[in-house]
């Protein structure tokens, strides 16, 4: 498979050594407001202002809404669409961007990547996220290194597509019979005999740290998701983010993967989020259904000034033809 070229020019940073914690720059609205009010005050005109808490609590625009290509597939045998077909449907429905699920890609050649990028551009859509699957929870160092190589490959794919962040996972112990069993046990599974969570976290930290030089070179932020295994809880995800302490490792917050104390855990993870995946379950969930109050989620994210993408992951049994437009309406209303 062709490797997309990496240009040394992409290592250049603006602003000296100042590096933001996410892929999108933030504007300090207090500075903007100070500039806006300076002129009338200088001329003797008294400006009437709203309370400071009110002016800083609102974003100048709502969050942009994307859709994951997973939403059109959901691992169903009869509904695996191509990435380009998903882009067409996303544009037709009225989304702002598309998140690509790596395992859904049928061709990773550079020519295919550029066709995907052009297709999105011509539809006026951002390619805003890339979700990969990997695990570092293996006692065998060779298996961990294999997953490091896979993750680096996915970083480079995202770079070639112009995508600024990829979803990564900690991985899990793999002691469940299958994924259905894991879901029946609410994502909890026994550790491998003879090993502890501390061993697992050390392996994950080592693996992520090996990926970070490529992430920085490509300008692609790794978003560690609350996605079962050692990352099942906000505290597990934050343990790794805080230990590694890099601007190129932050969080992908998945609203559907906290099965206990979900709003408290959203609040814990929100300050580190560079990408948010929003689950909906029209027709009943494939494995379970969560009642998610997206107005409340929007309030939690606004409190930490999250202005990034909200990416729909539809995981219900209803046809995507009807469920995805309804999901978009729900998210548009909450994140306006």
Image: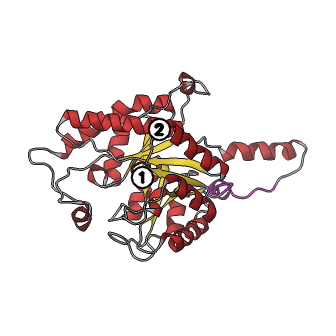
Closest to the observer, 98 or 77: 77
Closest to the observer, 95 or 193: 95
* 27 w.r.t. 7: above or below: below
Residue drawn at point x = 54 percent, y = 57 percent: 85
Residue drawn at point x = 85 percent, y = 45 percent: 41
Farthest left residue?
194
Which is nearer the N-term, disc 2 or disc 1? 1
* Residue 164 showing in the rendered view: no
Closest to the observer, 122 or 128: 122
Mark 1 neighbour density, 10 Å: few (under 14) some (14–19) many (20 or more):
some
Identify the element where label 1 is drawn: helix
Residue drawn at point x = 39 percent, y = 34 percent: 152
Query: For mark 1, what is the residue?
Result: 104
Identify the element where label 2 is drawn: loop
Q: Quadrant of the N terminus?
A: top left
Closest to the observer, 266 or 142: 142
Query: For mark 2, what is the residue?
Result: 109
Q: Is residue 174 left or right of residue 24?
A: left
């Amino acid at each position: 498979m062709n490797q997309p070229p990496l240009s040394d020019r992409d290592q250049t940073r603006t602003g000296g050594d100042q590096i933001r914690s996410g892929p999108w720059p933030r504007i300090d609205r207090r500075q903007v407001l100070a500039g806006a009010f300076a002129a009338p005050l200088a001329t003797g005109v008294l400006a009437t202002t709203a309370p400071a808490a009110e002016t800083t609590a609102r974003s100048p625009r709502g969050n942009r809404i994307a859709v994951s290509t997973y939403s059109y597939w959901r691992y169903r045998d009869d509904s695996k669409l191509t990435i380009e077909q998903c882009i067409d449907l996303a544009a037709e429905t009225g989304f702002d961007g598309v998140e690509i699920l790596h395992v859904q890609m049928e061709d990773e050649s550079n020519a295919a990547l550029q066709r995907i990028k052009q297709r999105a551009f011509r539809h006026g859509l951002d390619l805003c996220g890339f979700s990969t699957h990997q695990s570092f929870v293996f006692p065998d160092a060779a298996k961990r290194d294999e997953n490091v190589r896979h993750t680096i490959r996915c970083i480079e794919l995202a770079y070639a597509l112009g995508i600024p962040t990829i979803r990564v996972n900690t991985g899990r112990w793999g002691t469940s019979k299958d994924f259905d069993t894991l879901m029946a046990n609410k994502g909890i599974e026994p550790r491998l005999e003879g090993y502890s969570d501390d061993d697992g976290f050390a392996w994950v930290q080592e693996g992520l740290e090996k990926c970070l030089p490529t992430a920085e070179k490509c300008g692609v932020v790794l978003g560690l998701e609350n996605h079962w295994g050692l990352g099942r809880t906000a505290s597990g995800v934050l343990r790794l983010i805080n230990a590694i302490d890099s601007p190129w490792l932050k969080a992908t917050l998945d609203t559907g993967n906290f099965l206990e104390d979900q709003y408290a855990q959203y609040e814990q993870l929100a300050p580190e989020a560079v990408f948010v995946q929003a689950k909906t379950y029209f027709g009943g969930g494939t494995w379970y259904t969560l009642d998610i109050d997206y107005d409340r989620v929007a309030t939690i994210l606004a409190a930490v000034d999250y202005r990034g993408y909200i990416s729909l992951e539809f995981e219900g049994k209803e046809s995507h033809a009807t469920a995805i437009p309804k999901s978009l309406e729900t998210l548009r209303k909450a994140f306006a």
